[in-house]
Image (cartoon, rainbow, N blue to C red):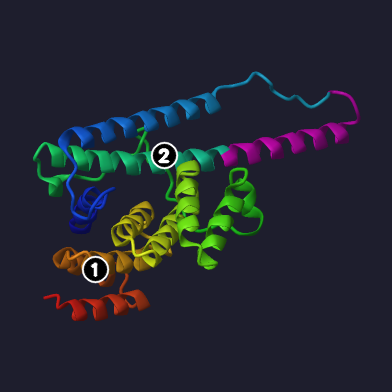
Amino acid sequence: MRIAALILGLALALGPGMPGMAQTRDETLADIRQELSVLFVQVQRLKRELSTTGGVSVPPAGGSTLQRIDAIEQELQRLTARAEEMEHRIQRIVEDGTRRIADLEFRLVELEGGDVSQLGETTTLGGVDLPTAAPATPPQGDQTAELAVGERADFDAARAALEAGEYATAVDLFTAFSQDYPVSPFAAEAHFLRGEAHWALGETSAAARAYLDSFSGDASGARAPQALVKLGLALDELGQAREACVTLGEVGRRFPETAEAQEAAQAMAGIGCQ
């Protein structure tokens, strides 16, 4: 809860504008209303997908018994694949919606002057816990079929711009990617690489926000330790030494015996963390 309260609080301070510039109450409430509207639209889209179209496909009755059995097996395979695809997409939407609701709860409590440290774990969107999903890592091989049309191509284009040193273009492409595919398995990676592009441009505050988005989006993923380290370094660069020390300290606590934990310890020594 310590790191959750800290980094979610930093999400407000690292928003658009100068580092540390606080949003007004009206602006923050307007943001919350807008995010709630986005969540509502996503839920409505999901409800439409779950509605039947009435187009049930029934295997033809003609042919031999063996042919009819083969037709039934093929239809079952098709329906099973479709059901698994829907389950995967629904789980991604629920995870994204739950994460956004947790952020809204934190911001509302902070606006009302409440104690954010007393916030419990957010109830899963829909009130039902889904099976624990594997860490969100970029799909490989045949799994790319589960991606939205153009999703992999858009991500690769943004990454190519970053690798070519076209940092401003990479920022724009990664920003567009995150808006177009908010629940993509590439989401945490896209936020992290956007942070790298901002950092290369000298945009430290924007980089810190991107690293925060990456870690918050997948706190146990492959990029999480590195995102925390980069967030801590960015906070120190912004003159927020205390927050930097707490953030870097979480790396060793959450990810002990990793290269990132050693890097964080060295950074803390350089900052002079107690």
Which mark, residue 237? Answer: 1
Left or right: residue 82 compared with residue 168? right
The residue sitting at 75% across, 24% down in the picture is 58
Looking at the picture, how far across and down is residue 267, in whole percent?
25, 77
Label 2 packing within 10 angstroms: few (<14), some (14-19), many (20+)? many
Q: Amino acid at mark 1?
A: Glu
Residue 258 in sight from this viewpoint = no
Quarter occupied by residue 110: top left
| Residue designated by label 2 | 94
Quarter occupied by residue 42: top left
The residue sitting at 21% across, 43% down in the picture is 106
Q: Amino acid at mark 2?
A: Val
The residue sitting at 58% across, 56% down in the picture is 157
Q: Viewer-proximal residue, 216 or 174?
A: 174
Looking at the picture, how far across and down is residue 128, in whole percent?
37, 36
| Residue 148 lies in the magenta stretch | no
Q: Is residue 99 above or below residue 68?
A: below
Element class at badge 2: helix
Going from the N terminus, do you reach mark 1 or mark 2 first? Answer: 2
Element class at badge 1: helix
**Magenta span dominant secondary structure:** helix
Label 1 packing within 10 angstroms: few (<14), some (14-19), many (20+)? some
Start-end of magenta stretch: 61-85
Left or right: residue 237 compared with residue 172? left
The residue sitting at 42% across, 58% down in the picture is 194
Q: Mark 1 and mark 2: span between their CA atoms? A: 35 Å
Q: Is residue 180 above or below residue 266?
A: above
Image quarter in which the N terminus is found = bottom left
Looking at the picture, how far across and down is residue 243, in whole percent?
17, 63
Left or right: residue 94 compared with residue 50? left
